[in-house]
Image: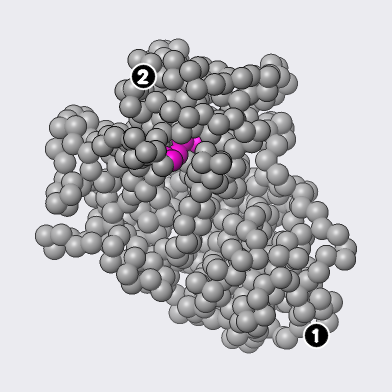
């Protein structure tokens, strides 16, 4: 690892910042929108992680320094580089730096092993990698061909992440802090930018081969990032309106979701574009530490990732009455993974005066809609009882008419018909999958002159236009000719008081073709057997949806984003 004294000099051709005059962006280019916010509120606190607190000016300066290093390494518009680290300020600094140059940061699951890391770097044709020093051994173990393709290797020291001083690092690795020192005088890069610049987000690495979803930035600005409004209530229609969306009284958003996942990246960035404060949770997920941050930082909004983070967070709150106040919180949201109706009901009872927002979307569609439950809609207990009685995976109201549920003929299903179709979106949708024309053709289809993206989510449409999700078609179980969506069974079982977590899969069965099987993590001291699980579901789900096998495990395996590892669960259920 170099000490930084021999780093190449920053490239020329950069412009200084004129703080007195802040011009409105001409397009919805990500870097332009960020720099506009940074110039409007340069001394306002922007980003907090552990002991590090950065103002908008400081965050922008640090991103400029890393952008200079990218240029010196020959990384430019259209090039890709990976970010392989848990949440930290450097994650956002690196992402902003890439956007400033028109380069494409690649979000990588920080728990990947060497083979998985190599797969995504190769798929993205990455030419650089920013990584947590604690994962240096994983990077060092990459295939030599993969390593040689990386012109820049940068190690960062992530708060809450530990690494031995002797941890192996690939030859030529540069420390992030040395880059900051070596490029101390760097200012903003001058490059041509537009809303046609690309944005890349990878998805699908937990259940199949990772897929890079490629967007035009202007389309992603609205579809993924809220169109200038983090609450998605009043998106802008032209760049001049961005001035009205820089908050005079900034909100404080707590980001628990990993930035390597859309649920964290999109929401955190949208609050930064609005001139607000973003607090990152350093280290491993610790529910008590999260509540400490809520009170210490005066958090106004936070997002949980399904039951995987929501349950332990609420369990900790309820087990420590009076320890935390959370009086600053006015909105709690869920994103990135489904939340069971039973857990939503518990949140509504614990926080009856807060707005609860359950968002729905995917990397291929952006945020498509949400279910918003507010105290003004009625008594908190009434809302909680109504939510606890829901079936299905989730329910949402589309943000726009461009969302539809399409049948097998690619025609919208009639509201209230009960017909099952696939959730789809037209209008502002991605270009396709990076370097994968075959999969792009399967997912992005044309019908009657309109281009649609077809998700894997199956759903029905109620008479009031509410979309009720059933589950992902890729995990659908065919048992005796009946279709069972595993997420629906999972959501129902999550309501059992003795079940801490559950994943449902289909396993081969001589009689039924596939049998519904549940891998269950019981609460400490509890004992859940097959008959108890089936009895609990009586009256809630049809008998053919009940599990025919239950396997208890000490811990359910999930991704850092809370997504179930169905391959692992299937091996457990069949073992």
In what quadrant of the picture does the N terminus appear?
A: bottom right
Across and down, in percent, residue 154 comes to 71, 71
Give the camera-side residue of 549 and 292.
Answer: 549
Across and down, in percent, residue 51 comes to 78, 48
Determine whether, in the image, residue 219 is placed left or right of residue 296: left
Q: Is residue 175 magenta?
A: no
- Asked if the residue under mark 1 is in contact with the one under mark 2, i.e. CB atoms within 8 Å, the reply is no
Which residue is identified by label 1?
6
Which residue is identified by label 2?
540
Give the camera-side residue of 72 and 338.
Answer: 338
Q: CA distance from mark 2 to mark 1?
A: 67 Å
Q: Residue at x 18, y 49 (%)?
A: 408
In what quadrant of the picture does the C terminus appear?
A: top right
Determine whether, in the image, residue 105 is placed left or right of residue 220: right
Q: Quadrant of residue 196?
A: bottom left
Q: Residue at x 63, y 87 (%)?
A: 12
Q: Residue at x 51, y 41 (%)?
A: 574
Q: Which residues are magenta?
A: 503-507
Determine whether, in the image, residue 61 is placed left or right of residue 259: right
Across and down, in percent, residue 319 comes to 68, 19
Give the main secondary structure, helix, strand or loop, of the magenta stretch.
strand
Give the camera-side residue of 328 and 366.
Answer: 366
**Furthest residue in direction left, as rendered:** 448
Q: Is residue 504 magenta?
A: yes
Q: Is residue 285 visible?
A: yes
- Neighbor class of circle 2 (other Cα within 10 Å; few <14, some 14-19, many 20+) is some
Q: Helix, strand, or loop for circle 2?
A: loop
Determine whether, in the image, residue 467 is placed left or right of residue 108: left
Q: Is residue 7 above or below residue 23?
A: below
Give the camera-side residue of 468 and 291.
Answer: 468
Q: Is residue 149 above or below residue 442?
A: below
């Amino acid at each position: 690892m170099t000490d930084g004294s021999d780093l190449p000099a920053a490239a020329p051709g950069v412009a200084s910042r004129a703080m007195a005059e802040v011009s409105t962006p001409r397009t919805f280019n990500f870097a332009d929108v960020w720099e506009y916010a940074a110039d409007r509120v340069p001394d306002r606190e922007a980003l907090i992680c552990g002991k590090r607190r950065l103002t908008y000016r400081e965050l922008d300066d640090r991103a400029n320094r890393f952008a200079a290093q990218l240029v010196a390494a020959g990384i430019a518009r259209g090039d890709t580089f990976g970010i392989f680290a848990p949440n930290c300020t450097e994650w956002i600094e690196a992402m902003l730096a890439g956007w400033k140059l028109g380069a494409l940061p690649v979000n990588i699951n920080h728990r990947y092993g060497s083979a998985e890391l190599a797969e995504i770097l190769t798929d993205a044709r990455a030419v650089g990698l920013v990584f947590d020093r604690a994962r240096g051994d994983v990077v060092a173990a990459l295939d030599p061909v993969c390593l040689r393709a990386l012109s820049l290797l940068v190690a960062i020291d992530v708060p809450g992440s530990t690494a031995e001083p002797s941890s192996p690092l690939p030859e030529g690795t540069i420390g992030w802090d040395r880059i900051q020192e070596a490029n101390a005088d760097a200012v903003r890069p001058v490059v041509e930018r537009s809303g046609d610049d690309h944005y890349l987000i990878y998805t699908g690495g937990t259940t199949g081969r990772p897929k890079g979803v490629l967007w035009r930035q202007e389309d992603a600005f609205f579809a993924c990032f809220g169109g200038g409004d983090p609450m998605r209530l009043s998106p802008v229609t032209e760049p001049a309106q961005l001035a009205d969306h820089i908050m005079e009284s900034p909100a404080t958003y707590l980001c628990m979701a990993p930035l390597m996942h859309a649920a964290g990246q999109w929401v955190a960035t949208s609050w930064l574009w609005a001139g607000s404060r973003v607090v990152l949770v350093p280290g491993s997920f610790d529910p008590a530490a999260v509540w400490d941050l809520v009170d210490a930082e005066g958090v106004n909004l936070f997002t949980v990732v399904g039951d995987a983070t929501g349950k332990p967070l609420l369990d900790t709150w309820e087990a420590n009455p009076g320890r935390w106040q959370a009086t600053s919180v006015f909105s709690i949201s869920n994103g990135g993974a489904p939340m069971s109706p039973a857990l939503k009901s518990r949140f509504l009872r614990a926080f009856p005066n807060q707005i609860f927002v359950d968002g729905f979307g995917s990397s291929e569609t952006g945020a498509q809609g949400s279910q918003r439950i507010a105290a003004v809609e009625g008594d908190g207990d009434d809302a909680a009882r109504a939510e606890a009685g829901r079936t299905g995976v989730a329910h949402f109201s589309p943000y726009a008419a461009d969302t539809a549920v399409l049948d097998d003929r690619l025609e919208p299903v009639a509201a209230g018909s009960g017909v099952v179709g696939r959730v789809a979106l037209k209008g502002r949708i991605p270009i396709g999958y990076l370097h994968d024309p075959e999969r792009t053709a399967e997912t992005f289809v044309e019908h009657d002159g309109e281009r649609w993206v077809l998700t894997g989510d199956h759903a029905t449409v109620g008479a009031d236009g509410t979309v009720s999700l059933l589950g992902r078609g890729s995990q659908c179980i065919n048992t005796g000719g009946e279709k069972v969506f595993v997420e629906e069974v999972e959501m129902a079982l999550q309501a059992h008081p003795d079940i801490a977590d559950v994943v449902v899969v289909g396993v081969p069965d001589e009689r039924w073709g596939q049998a519904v099987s549940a891998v269950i993590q019981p609460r400490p001291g509890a004992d859940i057997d097959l008959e108890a699980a089936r009895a609990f579901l009586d009256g809630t789900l049809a008998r053919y949806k009940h599990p025919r096998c239950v396997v208890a495990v000490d811990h359910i395996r999930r991704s850092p984003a809370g997504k179930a590892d169905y391959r692992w669960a299937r091996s457990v259920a069949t073992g």
